[in-house]
Amino acid sequence: MITGRDIIVTVVAVCATITAVALAQGPGKPIMKSSVFDWDSFKVEAKNFGAMRQCFSARTATLDLLDCHITTLNPGQAPHAPHHHPEEELLIVKEGTLEVMQNGVTNHASAGSMIFQASNELHGVRNTGQVPVTYYVIKWVSPGMLKNSAP
């Protein structure tokens, strides 16, 4: 027989679960909908290596985070030292040529090339040419990935 106490315990458990799910999804972080992002609308932020344009950084219906920014590297510059991180990313070279280091192997990627950086693999890029290089960086965080990833 179901008692009043059983109902109260069930209601409290359901409310706690709903609250936990809402907090995990991040309050105030709306899900990005279908959108068009115009090049001329991106704010150009000067950096010591060149420039950066932030396109978007938001949750989607299937990802905890989808982020895109555009980096321009001046000749001889790198955005940062080689590193690794749990999220995967895709770089698309718009113009120029990048020197790409992945796990100790160096390659070159020219305009139109795509570069995939796998989770937790050492990688870095550098402009070794005589003209600026511009590339798009698209990275994503799958649900639960950051709490389950290896350092």
Image (cartoon, rainbow, N blue to C red):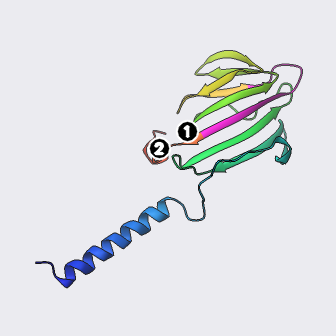
Tell me the residue that label 2 is attached to.
145
Q: Is residue 106 at all visible to an observer of this figure?
A: yes
Give the side of residue 149 with respect to residue 111, left or right.
Answer: left
User: Which mark is drawn over residue 147?
Assistant: none
Q: Quadrant of the N terminus?
A: bottom left
* Residue farthest left in this picture: 1
Amino acid type, mark 1: Glu
Q: Position of residue 71 (x, y in %)?
A: 78, 36
Looking at the rendered structure, the kind of residue marked 2 is Met
Rendering coords of residue 13 (x, y %)? 31, 71
Residue drawn where x is 62% and y is 38% of the image: 139
- Numbered-mark total: 2
Describe the element under mark 2 as helix, strand or loop.
helix
Return the residue at label 1: 87
Rounded to the nearest angstrom, the CA distance separating label 2 from label 1 is 8 Å
Asked where in the image residue 28 lies, by quadrant, the reply is bottom right
- State yes or no: residue 138 in magenta: yes
Question: How dense is the environment of label 2, judged by Cα within 10 Å: few (below 14), some, or many (20 and up)?
Answer: some
Does dot 1 land on a helix, a strand or a loop? Answer: loop
Question: Quadrant of residue 115 in the image?
Answer: top right
Which residue is at a point 82% across and 41% down the rendered structure image? Answer: 39
Identity of the residue furthest to the bottom in this view: 4
Q: Nearer the viewer, residue 1 or 128?
A: 1
Identify the magenta region.
Answer: 126-139
